[in-house]
Image: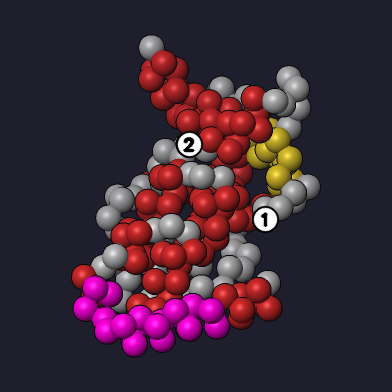
Amino acid sequence: MILLVLLLSTTACAPNIDPHYLDSYSDVSATEGITVSSVPAPQHEMRFASPTGMCNVTVMVGGKELLVSKEFLAVHSPVLAARMYYLPENSPIVLDNSSYEEFVSLLEVIYPGRAKITDDTVASILKLGYRYQIERALELAESHLKSSEKFESVAKLHLGDQYGLFGLTSTAEYSTFSDSLKAAICDRFMELAKEHIYYN
């Protein structure tokens, strides 16, 4: 019964799914850089703009409203579940430290009829997936990075270390590295971290 209610709530909040957004978990690619920047809003962000079915909570991001399923968010994110537990009835969830476009991209990835993770969105999906402890988003992003031929190994290892993606930091390739090469990679991690802090 609980599963049926959850299924109804998620599909009710996601009507008229564009078939171009239907995707398999394995059909992914990755980006070359690690700089997190704002990404274009998905074409179908209107999906979260109108009250439908069991969309029963408002999320305020960047001064804009998104209408979503409270139950769906709670199942996917323990962080947002805790926020909603202490939220007065009919009050919105206010996310001051997130970008509207990036949060819409995150929702599009985890909602039924998943949107593809792209070169432009993988970094922000990792950032928000880690911030809100959304395991599904992190799994999809990790799979995305593993299959990439564009993403440098050092950058993959850096992101794996930063976001706890151990599938990226325990690769067979890494296990063959010499101690001196591993030390050089650690030094490069520090340089990348400094650049990230400086430019963000």
Q: Relative to 134, is 71 above or below?
A: above
The number of numbered badges drawn on the structure is 2
Instruction: Please report the bounds of the magenta region as a residue range.
Output: 174-192
Which residue is at the front of the view, 137 or 165?
Answer: 165
Residue type at tag 2: His
Residue 28 found in image quarter: bottom left
- Residue 68 place in picture, x, y as percent: 59, 33
Quarter that holds the N terminus: top left
Identify whether 56 is placed above or below 115.
above
Callout 2: 10 Å neighbours few (<14), some, many (20+)? some
Which one is closest to the eye, mark 1 or mark 2? 2
Query: Which numbered marker is on residue 57?
Result: none
Q: Is residue 182 magenta?
A: yes
The mark that comes first in sequence, 1 or 2, is 2
Residue pointed to by mark 1: 99
On screen, residue 81 versus residue 138, left or right, reads right
Q: Secondary structure at mark 2?
A: helix
| Res 76 label | 2
- 194 falls in the magenta region: no
State whether residue 171 appears in this view.
yes
Where is residue 2? Give x, y as percent: 41, 16
Give the residue at x 42% y 38%.
112
Q: CA distance from mark 1 to mark 2?
A: 19 Å
Identify which amino acid the numbered label 1 is placed on: Ser
**The C terminus - image quarter:** bottom right
Label 1: how many Cα within 10 Å (few below 14, some 14–19, many 20+): some
